[in-house]
Amino acid sequence: EIVLTQSPATLSLSPGERATLSCRASQSVSSYLAWYQQKPGQAPRLLIYDASKRATGIPARFSGSGSGTDFTLTISSLEPEDFALYYCQQRSNWPLTFGGGTKVEIK
Amino acid sequence: EVQLLESGGALVQPGGSLRLSCAASGFTFTTYAMTWVRQTPGKGLEWVSTLSGAGGTTYYADSVKGRFTISRDNSENTVYLQMNSLRAEDTAVYYCAKGFPVGTYLGAFDYWGPGTLVTVSS
């Protein structure tokens, strides 16, 4: 099973600041990594797939990078609606696995 | 507009059974794999099972293999999760999700339902 480790667990930032979230895989997943945003009481929302491709309707301030075992989600300038939980997910091998999440909170 | 809506969540005793349903609309249902993902406060998001678009290929997490069965009715645009021999650790919100991109079983998920709560407790 591929283990995804997200860091930090919590990121405390102010609106307008840049957020950098990390996801590290226990073995290579090539570029088969996705990022999701989840707000309380809601289902996850796909932001990025295949490491760097923005999903439909996702603002340009969200970007993804990386390959192999190290990946980054960057939010260039935090909007109030961006404070939420973020998860990564690999689709390289069965079982599909998710990271433990990073909470982006208002400082 | 793509919509997914789960139903069937309930309180059930350990050892009991439950069938979840997920009604889909707004896309060509037979073209996409469908997946169940569950979420608990303690364990986060956990992939449960995936079923191919035609319904002939299934994948299960080890934690549910032999107890859960995924199926679909392509005439009704509905995917099911039959859950037997339920345990306390199966307690979670269960989401159905549409696979992405098209043509793969090993997918990301571009649409999710709102989820249905399953509680296993005596």
Image: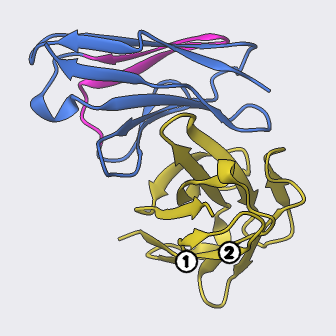
Chain colours: A blue, B yellow
| Subunit that carries the residue with mark 2 | B
**Tag 1: residue type?**
Gly
Q: Is residue A25 left or right of residue A6?
A: right
Residue reaching furthest to the front: B122
Give the mark nearer the N terminus: 2 vs 1.
1
Q: Position of residue B71 (x, y in %)?
A: 76, 74
Which residue shows up at 79% across the image and 46% down it? B61
The Cα–Cα distance between marks 2 and 1, rounded to whole angstroms, is 7 Å
Q: Quadrant of residue A68?
A: top right
Q: Are marks 2 and 1 in contact (CB under 8 Å)?
A: yes
Which residue shows up at 39% across the image and 29% down it? A86
Q: Is residue A54 visible?
A: yes
Q: Quadrant of the C terminus of chain B?
A: bottom right
- Bounds of the magenta segment: A58-75
Which residue shows up at 9% across the image and 18% down it? A15
Q: Position of residue B87 (x, y in %)?
A: 73, 55
In this view of the protein, which residue sits in the foreground, B108 or B71? B71
What's the mark number on residue B8?
1
Q: Is residue A106 left or right of residue B119?
A: left
In this view of the protein, which residue sits in the foreground, B104 or B114? B114
| Mark 1 closeness class: few <14, some 14–19, many ≥20 residues within 10 Å | some
Residue reaching furthest to the right: B66
| Subunit that carries the residue with mark 1 | B
| Mark 2 closeness class: few <14, some 14–19, many ≥20 residues within 10 Å | some
Task: Name the residue tied to disc 2.
Answer: B18
Q: B91 above or below B44?
A: below
**Tag 2: residue type?**
Leu
Asked whether residue A64 is drawn in magenta, I would say yes
Q: A11 above or below A89?
A: above
Tell me whether marks 2 and 1 sit on the same chain. Answer: yes
Badge 2 element: strand
Number of marks: 2
